[in-house]
Image: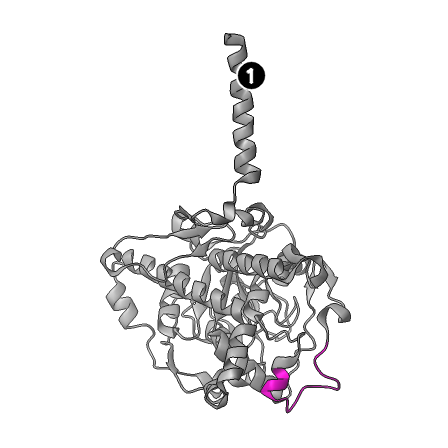
Amino acid sequence: MAALRAPSAVVIGVATVFFLLYLLPWQNLPSIQIPSPSPASYTWRHSAYPAENSNRLQREWAFRASDLDLLNANAVPTGMITYRAIRDTGIVFNASGSDVLVILHIQKTGGTSFEKHIVQDLDLEKPCICWKRRKRCKCPRPALSNSVETKNENVDSWLFSRFSTGWICGLHADWTELTSCVDEELKRAHGSSVRRRYFYVTMIRDPIHRFLSEFRHVQRGATWKASRHICQKQYATAEELGSCYSGRSWVGVSLKEFMSCPHNLAFNRQTRMLADLSLIGCYNKSSMSTSERNRIMLASAKRNLESMAFVGLTEQQKISQYVFEETLKLRFKIPFTQNEDTYSKATLDKATAEELDAVRQANSLDLELYQYAEQLLNNRFLELKEHDPDFDEHYNFLGEKGYHFSWDDIENED
């Protein structure tokens, strides 16, 4: 009888595993609560720490078993330093070493204004070198600053942005393009003997205002036709991208027309630009269903946002400035303030309820991503505040000279 019990136990065990893996309806199970750190596609459950628990850090995530495939596929790019690595190990950005600040610039999020602050207003021993009537500056490492005498001299820079290196990875390069290009381009330009550390940063904006701001920009003639849309070393085809207008531009387009084109890249632009598009077959929309594509793209964008060294919100300039300064141990000479009046707000006020509902539906991924970014920034702010013994002095006296941030400044960004 003893000899029969062992096989019976094995059979029962195998049957149990089979039932759990293949027959149990996982989608009906309650969410599993997992503490930090978070993997690729966890969804944030709470927008802020409860007031009574503000003195201790808490993170609660809703885990989706169907997103397990993203955990290994969406790996940290070469040399990238994550926010969590900075906080857990005490890494400090070192412009004199091999560190590079990489700016992922999403259209109509205030990225141009933010990048101007980087090249003009950081309190550095050796600041960037800018020339009048030129859009580009040189941001050489401190040891090289004294040797930069000409405008075109190629020097190793601590900053990778439109105002320093230019669009060498493509106009408004997204996450997919940047992470496959930056290290390769810098090695080509300055040699491969140095192992560089990359600190990725970006700004996120309220999706409705950002979308309407892009609409206004396109209405005035913007096209961004020079964007390359490269994924897995292949350009997206004209058939994959589609077209919304004939001629040179879409100047004079109405909001209804702007909304009616299914190929409009303004829809959920922030999610798409922050996701690893290789996970969804790049721009080939026939590789999977729309719902599956959206699910994976949003999960990837959230995971990438979480891993970036800095994520700021256009609507929260002061908190964003503090989080940037305290995370990277870099200080701005000026405080960021803002004016709430915007061109996009004027467009918003004129739109009908039906139009606004259509805009929300068309940007549903960005709306969820923005909520995630809000929570991410808030939690980082509270974490940094808790560990900053000089918080009051630092936060209340950001910068030295007043600077008036105007929302209208970003309406004419490229």
Q: Secondary structure at mark 1?
A: helix
Taking the image as shown, residue 27 lies to the left or right of residue 78, namely left
Q: Quadrant of residue 323?
A: bottom left
The overriding secondary structure of the stretch rendered in magenta is loop
Taking the image as shown, residue 334 lies to the left or right of residue 228, namely left
Residue under label 1? 7
- In depth, the one of 235 and 349 nearer the eye is 349
Residue 318 percent across, percent down from the top left? 35, 73
Quadrant of the image containing the C terminus: bottom right
Residue 159 percent across, percent down from the top left? 54, 65
Other residues around mark 1 within 10 Å, as few (<14) / some (14–19) / many (≥20): few
- In depth, the one of 356 and 208 nearer the eye is 356
Which residue does the image show at 45% across and 83% down from the upper left? 407
Taking the image as shown, residue 36 lies to the left or right of residue 136, namely left
Pick out the residue farthest to the front. 1
401 inside magenta stretch: no
Residue 55 percent across, percent down from the top left? 25, 55
Which residue does the image show at 41% across and 75% down from the upper left? 315
Q: Which residues are magenta?
A: 243-258
- Label 1 sits on what residue type? Pro
In the image, is residue 309 above or below residue 112? above
Pick out the residue farthest to the left. 52
Residue 133 shows in this picture: no
Which residue does the image show at 27% across and 53% down from the upper left? 56
Residue 266 percent across, percent down from the top left? 60, 75
248 inside magenta stretch: yes
